[in-house]
Amino acid sequence: MKQYVVIGCGRFGSSVATTLYLLGHEVMAVDKNYDIVQDIADKVTHSVQADAIDENTMRSLGIRNFDIAVISIGSDVQASTMATLIAKELGVKYVLCKAQNELQAKVLYKIGADRVVFPERDMGVRVAHNLVSENVLDHIELDPNYSIVEVVTPSDWIGKSLMELDLRAKYGINVMAVKHNKDIDISPAPDAKLQQGDILVVIGENTKINKISKEDR
């Protein structure tokens, strides 16, 4: 079980904090807004009202003892920068930050952030892909050219096996898993027949994955 500190508990931060807690980890949520701290109190291990850019306060909270810090203060660039810098200087080994744009991300990486995410941009990408491709359920962009996608099995593929479809040769993609109802097969057999409603988790080049979304059109 790892220990997490989530600094800034707006919509993104509170979602991260409560999910980590539900997954069985120890989570301390920190925000300077009293109402937010009270609201999240019963959804995490500890909740603290504090100013994340006050180094003495952060030291007194013992954040150096946490394995991972999540800095979710994307809208206030100065506060996000200072909180990240303080977390690293106090000894947090891994710091993940929320950013609004590439410039902010570049600054955060320069001062020691281990990873920077763009929740609004990433969600926008997912929504756009879902709108354009009706049978694409979820989309995770690995880089501008490659993605992991959840796609509903096209009707022409039902009753056929992965071996018969030969997706790697035809589309240049790899099937990582097959979901059927509530079950998930992370090592689908080449001769297993695809069924109505199966969801494929595939990885590959975006231009080739897009071909799948046009199978039923």
Image (cartoon, rainbow, N blue to C red):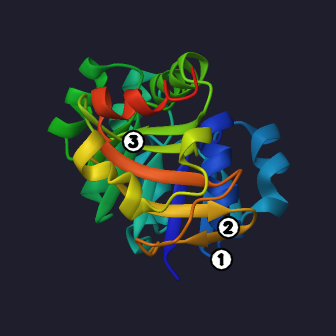
Res 201 visible: yes
Q: Amino acid at mark 2?
A: Tyr
Q: Is residue 184 left or right of residue 112?
A: right
Classed neighbour count for the residue bearing mark 2: other residues with Cα under 10 Å, few (<14), some (14–19), many (≥20): some
Q: Is residue 163 left or right of residue 61?
A: left
> Is 93 situated above or below 97?
below
Q: From the image, tell me which residue sits under label 2.
A: 21
Res 45 visible: no
Of the two numbered discs 3 and 2 on the same chain, state the one appearing first in sequence: 2
Of the two numbered discs 3 and 1 on the same chain, state the one appearing first in sequence: 1
Q: Amino acid at mark 3?
A: Cys
Q: Residue at x 33, y 49 (%)?
A: 167
| Residue at disc 3, secondary structure | strand
Q: Residue at x 80, y 58 (%)?
A: 41
Classed neighbour count for the residue bearing mark 3: other residues with Cα under 10 Å, few (<14), some (14–19), many (≥20): many
> Is 207 situated above or below 162?
above
Q: Position of residue 33 (x, y in %)?
A: 71, 36
Between the residue at mark 3 and the residue at mark 1, the CA separation in whole angstroms equals: 22 Å
| Residue at disc 1, secondary structure | loop
Q: Residue at x 67, y 47 (%)?
A: 15
Q: Position of residue 74 (x, y in %)?
A: 47, 28
Q: Position of residue 165 (x, y in %)?
A: 39, 52
> Is 158 situated above or below 61?
above
Q: From the image, tell me which residue sits under label 1.
A: 24
Q: Residue furthest left?
A: 110
Cβ–Cβ below 8 Å for labels 2 and 1?
A: yes
Q: From the image, tell me which residue sits under label 3.
A: 97
Between the residue at mark 2 and the residue at mark 1, the CA separation in whole angstroms equals: 5 Å
